[in-house]
Amino acid sequence: MASEILTVAEMYAADRAAMEAGIAGTALMEAAGRAVADAVARRWRPGAVAVLCGPGNNGGDGFVAARHLRALGWDARPILLGRRDDLRGDAAWAAGTWDGPVLPPDPAHLDGADLVIDALFGAGLSRPLDGAALALVKALEGRTAPVVAVDVPSGVRGDDGAILGAAPRAALTVTFFRRKPAHLLLPGRLRCGEVEVADIGIPDGVLRRIAPRLAANGPDAWGIGFPWPKEEGHKYGRGHALVLGGAVMTGAARLAARGALRAGAGLVTVAAPAQAVPIYALSSPSLIVQPADDPAAFAALLDDPRRNAVLLGPGAGAWPALRQAVRAAVDRGKAGVLDADVFPAFADDPPVLFQGLTDRWLLTPHGGEFAKLFPDIRGDKVTMARAAAARCGAVVLLKGADTVVAHPDGRAAINANAPPDLATAGSGDVLAGFALGLIAQGVPAFEAGRMAAWLHGECGSLLGPGLIAEDLPEALPAALRRLKGLAG
């Protein structure tokens, strides 16, 4: 599945570009409706299908789908929101190709349907459902008939996945040319079910004209750039990661360090207060452990140019000292990851943190931590992550089931493969460690954040229910084997 994600405006631009290239709007609508019918026919046996048709082009797609399904042996029943005589343009053309009865928008007409096609409204809906449309959508609740949505389930806003009053839970959503943000962002993603992207004849070349800046995260976009070990390589060529460990919450830094090792960093050093050194040293024989009782000692470790990637925050505590450690790492031109305790440490004056940050740094806040640094930034998750990245000058990975990774230049990616089992203590520390290990190997922070988020989700899916954070680094080899197969 192609990785580009188009906003509603960009999808309209793709339609216009196709029509300017000589493809009629009716041809696009015919192809879209046929794609919906074909997707239904591949999954279900013929029966009674209620086709909810809206007053615009989405409804036109529904009329075409009804016509093709009837030809395949289905008892198709279009239900039109509004009057047939009021339809205009391509939608009127599509309704004109249907020579059977058209039912009014009465929820009773859903009775007896074995399947429902929702072609009321597409991704461009901007106001809450009301009136007959709301009644039809509400009437779908509790019915056993599966729902197939055209473009997006009606009531889901295409650009951010917001639910505008109500939306059905579709078993399948058929969209066209490229996915929209709502297919990956919560809560809309939960209403889409399986998403199928249909080719309706829009040339891929229009993407050069549109130049989308949002993508679905995954190996299709970055797999070829993964830093696989080379036969002639050695550990010193795979980077040396430095993790600042705390004196009390030692588990966080240990999890992160283990994650960095598993992600391929050639060496990983944990710097920790002297009293905690035995804990870190005994946690893994693969780790190098160095005492660092004050910011000056940590800064001395940073002076070694071979330590090229730094993680600060997980379990670090000691906020004044942590602030000094962050400044020391940034001012020395290191690359790395800022996480966890870094965010409350700078919450009283975020610009101090942002000073000197570049796109070689990755910030990995969850929603609560994000609010501490960026209390005035509101909106959908993509908008928030982009605004934060532009403000701080670094890459921002806004964590969650629909993690967004944003670059200061406006590029962004949505990660949607994370299972709910990852919501467990220490999981985010491992994610930070994965990203650190990749940055140590020379992967730019934006790509490292994307790779780490996908691998983190893949590890969660491989482990499944019952996983704990300690399991995640140990699952990474299996996830990497799968990635290598996909990229191979």
Image: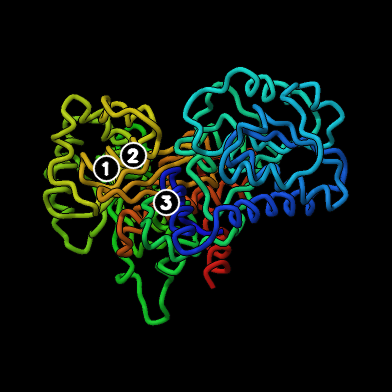
**Relative to the observer, which residue lies in front, 288 or 413?**
413
Q: Quadrant of the N terminus?
A: bottom right
Name which residue type carries label 1.
Ala
Residue at the front extreme, as displayed: 85
Residue at screen point 55% across, 47% down = 417
Q: Is residue 84 above or below residue 14?
A: above
CA–CA distance in space, label 2 to label 1: 6 Å
* Res 259 seen here: no
Q: Position of residue 7 (x, y in %)?
A: 43, 45
Q: Residues within 10 Å of mark 3 (few under 14, many from 20)?
A: some
**Relative to the observer, which residue lies in front, 86 or 390?**
86
Residue hosting label 1: 389
Residue at screen point 40% across, 50% down = 214
CA–CA distance in space, label 2 to label 3: 25 Å
Residue hosting label 3: 13
Q: Position of residue 355 (x, y in %)?
A: 13, 41
* Secondary-structure class at tag 1: helix
**Labelled disc at residue 385:** 2
